[in-house]
């Protein structure tokens, strides 16, 4: 019997408005055997969000019951307002299906997962600078000014944690970022396979390596500076 598949767990975190949702959506559409961990949350659905697709929307009581029943791999209170959590069952299901798993979670959740699953691959998506993030948040027209200010402040604090991540993706041009994200996922699968790479595979690994923390650090510092220079 072949050994059970050990899923590769990919964590994607980003400040709100970084374009993460679109990147994740494209990634999931284009990547076979990659499951999305649908989080549980106590916040209300926004816009066209559907229960069981984007999130499981539950009451605070239901969430707290799940905490007591140890059903979460990690959970956090995001913006101090609502609970968000990753259910353990998605990891079990991915294992059974021979799939990998993608978690779209915040910085606190990423730290908890890294402690429990040190082999998880973490990816931080960044906007090119503060101005661009502010513009994107205003353009989507979902939030009042006060919330936008809070999101910008939260973004600065999240970005300060960039060096806890394995990969840093600066989302300037969607198509390029999308290619880079797919390269990261693919290159980690290739590495896990343990076999020699073809020239095409080597090119994928090289593309992914450009976004490794050590290579990306010098590109993050000016972004961080743009956030630090504009306190709320
Ligand atoms: P939103 O309310 O905009 O959908 O998400 C707010 C933040 O919560 C995002 O940073 C998102 O990544 C994070 N988030 C979503 N699901 C989870 C989860 O299961 N655990 C944690 N820790 N954060 C989550």
Image (cartoon, helix red, strand yellow):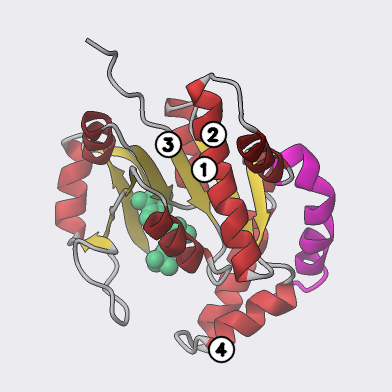
Q: Earlier in the sequence, mark 3 or mark 4?
A: 3
Using the rendered view, name the quadrant where residue 127 is placed.
bottom right
Residue at 60%, 67% (x, y): give it: 175
On the image, numbered disc 2 is attached to which residue? 188
Do the CB atoms of the residues marked 4 and 1 lie less than 8 Å apart? no
User: Quadrant where the C terminus lies?
Assistant: bottom right
Mark 4 close to ligand 1, CB under 8 Å: no
- Numbered badge on residue 139: 4
Distance from label 4 to label 1 (Cα)? 30 Å
Query: Which dot, 3 or 1, sits closer to the camera?
Result: 1
Answer few, some or many: residues within 10 Å of disc 3's Cα (few below 14, many 20 plus, some between 14 and 19): many
On the image, numbered disc 3 is attached to which residue? 9
* Magenta residues (range): 211-232
Do the CB atoms of the residues marked 2 and 1 lie less than 8 Å apart? yes
Query: Which dot, 2 or 4, sits closer to the camera?
Result: 2
Residue at 31%, 48% (x, y): give it: 37
């Amino acid at each position: 019997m072949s050994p059970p598949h050990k899923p590769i767990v990919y964590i994607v975190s980003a400040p709100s408005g970084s374009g993460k949702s679109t990147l994740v959506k494209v990634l999931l559409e284009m990547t076979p055997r990659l499951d999305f961990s649908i989080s549980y949350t106590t916040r209300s659905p926004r816009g066209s969000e559907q229960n069981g697709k984007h999130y499981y929307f539950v009451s605070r009581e239901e969430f707290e019951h799940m905490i007591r029943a140890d059903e979460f791999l990690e959970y956090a209170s995001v913006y101090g307002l609502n609970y968000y959590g990753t259910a353990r069952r998605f990891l079990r299901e991915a294992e059974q299906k021979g799939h990998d798993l993608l978690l779209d979670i915040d910085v606190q959740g990423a730290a908890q997962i890294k402690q429990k699953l040190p082999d998880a691959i973490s990816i931080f998506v960044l906007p090119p600078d503060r101005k661009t993030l502010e513009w994107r948040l205003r353009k989507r027209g979902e939030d009042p000014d006060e919330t936008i200010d809070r999101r910008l402040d939260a973004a600065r604090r999240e970005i300060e944690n960039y060096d806890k991540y394995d990969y840093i993706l600066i989302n300037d041009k969607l198509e390029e970022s999308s290619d880079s994200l797919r390269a990261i996922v693919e290159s980690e699968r290739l590495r896990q396979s343990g076999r020699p790479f073809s020239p095409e595979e080597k090119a994928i690994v090289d593309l992914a390596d450009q976004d490794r923390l050590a290579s990306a650090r010098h590109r993050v510092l000016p972004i961080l500076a743009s956030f630090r220079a504009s306190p709320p």
